[in-house]
């Protein structure tokens, strides 16, 4: 898939229209929030991460924000990724989240050289195409940077 | 000027003067509607700079060898040419690296006067706590933040003239905002978002009545309108070369003689001094007083070529052409469902800039969608966040014209926009 | 590095890369010995700028269309390239319009910290009456007057490290000038008059011992020496593109991360902010915090090409070549009756700059006489009046080299000088 | 005469080596002094004009200064021009001096188009060649600007 449709895959448009995890959950238990902003377009995201008691596993990720379809879809996909891990294994381990964020960043900065693997990134793999649009990388990264920052504070 | 008298301009033919327009973007013809951010350069401008670099390149005002003398002449001729383009004399034109630098120059020079620097005459610019600086709600950040910072450093108060829903300035409010405490009124000639020409004469009259200094941001007027800055009556005015077919890295500050003479210097260094000891320096008269360091000589020469290019077309013809394009663009935009124009004041004098919101589709997505069709527009807040906030937005899409913008270009924009909401699945 | 290991450089062959050198001056071959004022540009640099202007020209960091994205990538790649050339990371390199602008940036940012602007961390830069700023007697006006003005605005005291008769800095005096009250030590790496490389490590050690900020003027070292600014240990450093084969209108400020983070902004405007309301603005992290307004994109790209050109030659080879030329020039000058060299310290590390006085003939006349033979030198005080006063002069003649300077060029200078006193009727 | 010898005519080199009017005369009677400086090269001249009692005629022009051969010769030639007028007609009328300064400036700024007339400018006519060297025009003008300034104050 090339051109515009390679960027705006069906899945991305779906997520942006029907976002998951949108609406900040209550500040229950061990949690932290991060506000991130893309100074170029003014897009913002506020993202809350909630952890289990010993702070090792992520219970959920919720967010609020306004922005382009890429930034909205990306936040939604990130939220789903964490939610699935929580369902399957009682929460995504912190280290795993950090690794995912790192891998995501690397792929997006690769100018299209690295494809995100569907097995690992689930729906977010559809964001691979963003790497070829350097001006949009920040849009896709916004929620992921917010999670990274929130984890550092939690 | 009646349309019959106005010289015509053949925009489609002018495209051939701009080498970058030969490009295709993903196979599509490049429709460049981002001249408001930076203009493209005609071949003549690029050639003038290359010719200088390969034949006369040298630092100026510093030496006696042949290249240096030649460069100095070209540099001072360029000053006279660009000054003439805005109706001014050479000695009233200070080279700067751009409009941002020019506006900062003014704000910092006033700060320096406040700190007791400059000639005795500089004290007239010194600010005192409670003094007021006035801007408008339509300002570009370049004509807003320097004044915020000056206010913060000096204890002065920053006030603003509000904008009405239709994008015009609220002149009634202006008359009450500008008062006895007002020391500076800084405002844009044309908003880089709305494209509306502000009422310079009214604002100058209000400022003059209270003895305030007027600072005009002419960034978006200089490329599009015939300018006569002395006739406008402003004390100071700033513009950027890269927005008027010239190169990056060069712009100018125009100033009335007595204002430039009285303002303290801003940047200090070489080529702006008379005597210098280890302890203190004396400064040359304007414009040199404000031109510290090695000047961007090749860029001044290229900018002079750019204004000669515009002069050959005739600024009345440029404005007439861009008005035709602008009206077609605005009319077309009004008809697209979901498109909301920012500042669509009926009967307002305008240049070819249109900013709008597309309901349900983020500006970034609109821009990307258009880009895939070869249409380059700007998306974001265009460095005018307060104005966007005024209209309840964080970002908008902006299309802006140049001398080479054709009706086909406008139609490509309108065709693209007609399909954008469907693509992103927004019902209309 | 031993001469055996040093890569060689064929200066005569390099002349072909510089289109301007094909010119004749009044029928004579152009012998350009004024690279200290501004360097000539190789074709590759000119071509890189033209290629950008005709293929990717756009404003950066502001839009999503293809040209804007491409321009932004090229611009940030250029930053990384130029940063790498001086041993630094991209985020430690701030674009400025030149060294003068970079040095003013530092002085004004410190002034802003003094006025209470900037992050809480900025207070470490705030000056208090009695605080001292230290420069040297060899400074270019660009690294002198901004400090004079900062001192005058804040009540700080400006002191200086004297220069010895042989042109070297008096380090004993430096050790007593730099003391507990010293807040800033600003000094040039290489004097633009004497060509002598100053002892950076010694000065940094003295400054560090008292917790003073170090500011290096690297204008005359960057074009001639392999630089590793982090290894030199300075906090901040400035250089200009036009002196290192790049274009006018672009330069850089290097800064250590924590220093750039703590310094308040200087120029304010677009592209350097996060949020902006009518009342206040928040700023991006460095380097963007210092890059207000539309950046000179094409010039950054051309400068990157210039440092790639220098890198291909190898800065060790450049320095080795220029040293050979410099020694031939100095030796030849010493033998001409009536010629007095400024700063002829035995065994000093030098770049290819020689300034001198010709007894009985004014520098301007010497320059004119040489120009008639195609030899372009600079005459005057070279923006270092205090240093000239130190040597009892108001003006001198300066010859300075570049990568393309050949032994023939030096001989043309020496031949010309041999006849100058006779022409002006001064007995030798 | 072209090239360097067109600029540095014998007469110019003579005046610069043996300048007339050098050494400021005493501040006797109606007089005024002006200091001028060329910021590019640091050349300076201090020039004193002395007038008759009613301020209508110039008695003499003396000067002090350091600079290039052009600036020195120019000051010397100006001094002679005034001295000759004083000998012949009891002093150069103020208006005549102003006219001479204007004519001199115009010729020097003409980039070589206007030649100075020997009848009117005497030795100073040899400075015509300076007009072709724009960087040197200020050198030649220095003393003349000083006289203009001094007259305005006297
Ligand atoms: C040592 C030194 N410092 C500073 C400068 C100022 O650089 P620029 O004029 O490019 O701003 C120069 C050159 O003019 C210089 O040689
Ligand atoms: C209205 C207005 N003012 C000021 C500026 C700042 O100009 P520059 O970025 O060239 O310094 C711009 C453009 O960016 C503008 O459109």
Image: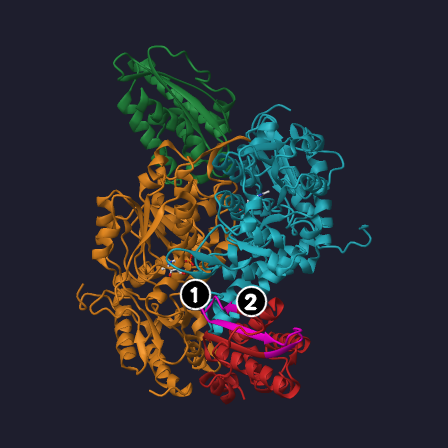
Chain colours: A green, B cyan, C orange, D red
Please state the chain letter of the residue tagged with numbered disc 1 in the rendered image: C
Mark 1 = which residue? Answer: C43
The disc placed on residue B74 is: 2
Which quadrant of the frame does ligand 1 lie within? bottom left
Q: Of C48 and C179, which appears nearest the observer?
A: C179
- Magenta extent: D35-59
Q: Is residue D43 magenta?
A: yes
Q: CA distance from mark 2 to mark 1?
A: 22 Å
Is any part of residue B188 visible from this angle? yes
SS assignment at label 2: helix
**Residue at 65% over, 52% down:** B404
**Residue at 75% over, 55% down:** B8
Dividing the picture into quadrants, the one containing residue C6 is bottom left
Q: Is label 2 or label 1 in front? A: 2
Residue C62 x, y percent position in the rendering: 50, 40
Q: Vertically, is B21 above or below D144?
A: above
The answer to whether residue A76 is left or right of residue B404 is left
SS assignment at label 1: helix
């Amino acid at each position: 898939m090339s051109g515009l449709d390679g960027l705006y895959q069906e899945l991305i448009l779906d997520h942006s229209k029907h976002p998951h995890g949108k609406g900040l959950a209550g500040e229950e238990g061990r949690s932290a929030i991060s506000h991130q902003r893309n100074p170029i377009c003014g897009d913002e995201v506020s993202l809350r991460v909630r952890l289990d008691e010993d702070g090792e596993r992520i219970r959920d990720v919720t967010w609020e924000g306004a922005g382009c379809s890429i930034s909205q879809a990306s936040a939604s996909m990130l939220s789903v990724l964490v939610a699935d891990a929580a369902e399957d294994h009682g929460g995504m381990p912190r280290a795993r989240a950090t690794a995912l964020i790192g891998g995501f960043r690397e792929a997006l900065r690769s100018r299209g050289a690295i494809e995100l693997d569907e097995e690992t990134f689930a729906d977010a793999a559809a964001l691979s195409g963003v790497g070829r649009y350097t001006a949009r990388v920040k849009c896709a990264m916004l929620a992921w940077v917010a999670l990274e920052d929130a984890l550092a504070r939690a | 000027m009646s349309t019959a008298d106005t010289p015509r301009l053949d925009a489609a033919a002018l495209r051939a003067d701009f080498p970058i327009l030969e490009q295709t973007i993903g196979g599509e013809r490049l429709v460049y509607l981002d001249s408001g951010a930076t203009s493209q350069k005609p071949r003549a401008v690029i050639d003038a700079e290359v010719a200088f670099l390969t034949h006369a390149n040298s630092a100026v005002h510093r030496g006696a060898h042949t290249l240096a003398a030649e460069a100095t002449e070209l540099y001072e001729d360029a000053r006279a040419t660009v000054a003439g383009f805005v109706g001014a004399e050479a000695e009233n034109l200070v080279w700067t690296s751009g409009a941002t630098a020019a506006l900062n120059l003014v704000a910092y020079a006033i700060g320096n006067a406040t700190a007791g620097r400059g000639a005795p005459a500089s004290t007239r610019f010194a600010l005192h706590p409670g003094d007021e600086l006035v801007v408008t709600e339509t300002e570009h950040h370049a004509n807003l933040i320097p004044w915020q910072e000056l206010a913060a450093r000096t204890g002065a108060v920053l006030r603003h003239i509000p904008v009405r829903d239709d994008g015009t300035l609220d002149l009634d409010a202006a008359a009450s905002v500008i008062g006895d405490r007002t020391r500076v009124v800084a405002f844009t000639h044309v908003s880089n978002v709305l494209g509306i020409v502000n009422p310079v004469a009214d604002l100058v009259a209000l400022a003059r009545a209270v003895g305030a200094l007027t600072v005009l941001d002419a960034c978006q007027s200089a490329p599009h309108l015939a300018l006569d800055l002395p006739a406008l009556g402003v004390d100071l005015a700033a513009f950027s070369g890269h927005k008027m077919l010239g190169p990056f890295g060069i712009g100018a500050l125009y100033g009335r003689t007595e204002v430039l003479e009285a303002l303290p210097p801003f940047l200090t260094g070489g080529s702006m001094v008379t005597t210098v000891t280890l302890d203190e320096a004396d400064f040359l008269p304007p414009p040199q007083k404000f031109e510290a360091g090695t000047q961007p000589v090749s860029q001044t020469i290229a900018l002079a070529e750019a204004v000669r290019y515009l002069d050959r077309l005739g600024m009345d013809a440029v404005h007439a052409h861009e008005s035709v394009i602008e009206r077609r663009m605005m009319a077309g935009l009004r008809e697209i469902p979901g498109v909301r124009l920012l500042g669509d004041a009926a009967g307002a004098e305008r240049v070819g800039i249109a900013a709008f919101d597309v309901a349900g589709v983020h500006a970034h997505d609109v821009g990307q969608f258009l880009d895939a069709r070869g249409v380059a527009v700007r998306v974001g807040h265009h460095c005018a966040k307060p104005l966007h906030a005024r209209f309840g937005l964080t970002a908008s899409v902006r299309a802006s014209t140049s001398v080479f913008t054709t009706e086909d270009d406008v139609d490509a924009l309108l065709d693209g926009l007609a399909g954008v909401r469907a693509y992103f699945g927004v019902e209309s």
